[in-house]
Amino acid sequence: MAKYIFVTGGVTSSLGKGIIAASLAKLLQARGMRVTIQKFDPYINVDPGTLNPYEHGECYVTEDGAETDLDLGHYERFLNIFTSQSNNVTTGRIYQTVINKEREGAYLGKTVQVVPHITDEIKRRMLLLGQNNEFDIIITEIGGTVGDIESLPFIEALRQLQWELPEEDTVVVHLTLIPYLKAAKELKTKPTQHSVKMLSQEGVHPDIIVCRTEKPLGPELRRKIALFCNVKQEAVIEAADAPTIYEVPLAMMREKLDLICMKKLNITQFNEPDLHRWKEFLDKLKYPKSQVTIGLIGKYIELQDAYKSILEAFVHAGAINECKVQVVNVHSEFITADNVGEKLANLDGLLVAPGFGLRGVEGKVIAVKYARENNLPFFGICLGMQMSVIEYARDILGLKEAHSTEMNPDTPDPVIDLMEEQKNITAKGGTMRLGAYACQIKEGTLAHRAYGKTMISERHRHRWEFNNKYLAKFEEAGMIASGKNPESGLVEIVELPAHPFFIGVQYHPELKSTVENPHPLFVHFIKAAKDYTEQKNAVKNPLLQSEMI
């Protein structure tokens, strides 16, 4: 039987429950256990697919096409395993299931209530991943903050599970905040005490308290927290701010978080943690030998989490190249033909990010043109790839009004058009082309050199596609389709062989980049940026140029 660890949060949001859950899972995995993580979100949306990136950050897509919370990206990046539809559950999905069952008559005319019907469905979902003997430990992160009205059904379901399951099969980890008051020059435990009290009032008592803090927790402070929150002193864990999220697993190992959990779960047989690859990655990340500056062209740059997976993919690729990747956010809405040279002049590479809608697209087109004409390494993802197609059609093919029908339904040259199977769809949620699809790559292309194989699988999230009616014109003019879906013929990858590094992909490669397996396109993009800056420096320094020769 699987065992269950529940992670709750108190005091404030954005404390990092997902990172703590992923770090704990990594440590348990490193000790030889089969671990997965699931996220329960209290909002009523069925999934984050229709949420504005400013509201919720990026929408993370799994292999099986689930639109999920961005924390699932942390889970995959840390554990190097796939998540699925079952790993992210919202209040909306819970209520939708219960209401559908009520409409079908499944409750035999009984009054449908939050308790027991909603809480029973929550419990069923919480236990679902543990029923097929695939995992030894299921870690469940409960979103929101203890005390929120919307979180109450999840906390009640947790209380019931603690009562129903054997005592040695559940652990509750509560993440809280120990604020530092500069005026008083001391850490304050009262918010944590109140948070634990509030959780206990709902019938759930934490076994472990993880304390986010700016300053170290001394023994006296730990003893105070343990005494007033009714846990053992060893179960008060310090989670100090770290330079990078990838150092958190090692910090939690020093605090013995995994050992304390295993003791409570009565797990007596386990290995010493094997983290040598993780530590190698951290060494390269902390001690880079070079640096590149990459421009991230997007329209949601005000919120860092809107491009979370892309930023993490840069971290992974930078470490492999022993190179620090400095990302400069450039708002596409403010790029014009007059200022593009000024805004992009000091970059070593350009990534045009995904997105939806008309706002900012002309700035992206202008940025693509700058990269193409100045031999600046270019990488376009989803909408970024489509913008590269539009730019090439306008400037090289002479189709001055070429556009996507997403932005201009009346364009005379729809080089980007709505996918055929999308044309009769009216519902927005969960109806895009989602999840993993195959792509066949032409040999001898940039994509083939990066992947090292001709058949790949990548994740998608889009409605519009390259219009194959124009493909022959593009290839005659020098832009080739180096990757296609073998069944539909959908163009997945475009590139310019005459350019040092110019590639656009319809899919989202950032979603499959992990610490242990950085995505090859990001790895080669950063390598191209390194080459670019070395050549640029050689031009400025003739002595360096002679050494390179």
Image (spheres, grey):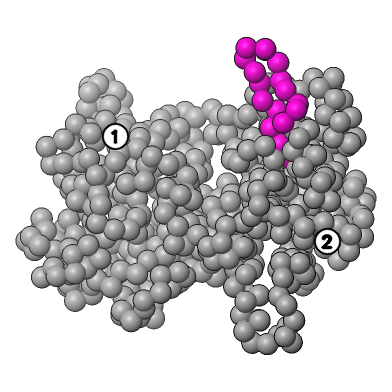
Q: Which quadrant of the figure contains the C terminus?
A: top left
Describe residue 289's horizontal placement relative to residue 442 as left or right: right
Coordinates of residue 452 in the picture (x, y in percent): 44, 60
- Whole-percent x and y of residue 117? 73, 72
Q: Please say whether residue 349 is one of the residues in the magenta stretch.
A: no
The foreground one among 245 and 289 is: 245
As displayed, is residue 506 above or below residue 421? Answer: above
Residue 161: numbered disc: 2
Q: Which residue position is annotated with label 1?
A: 347
Occupied quadrant, residue 4: bottom right
Residue 191: x %, y % from top left? 72, 31
Q: Which mark is residue 485?
A: none
Report the Cα–Cα distance between label 1 and label 2: 54 Å
Q: Is residue 95 above or below residue 317?
A: below
Figure label count: 2
Q: Nearer the viewer, residue 397 or 432?
A: 432
Say what secondary structure mark 2 lies in.
helix
Between disc 1 and disc 2, whose residue precedes? Answer: 2
Residue 81 sits in quarter: bottom right
Q: Residue at x 59, y 55 (%)?
A: 72
In the image shown, does 283 or 404 lie closer to the viewer? Answer: 404
- Amino acid type, mark 1: Leu
Q: Residue at x 75, y 54 (%)?
A: 155
Q: Position of residue 464 (x, y in %)?
A: 30, 69
Q: Which residues are magenta?
A: 175-191
Q: Residue at x 26, y 60 (%)?
A: 386
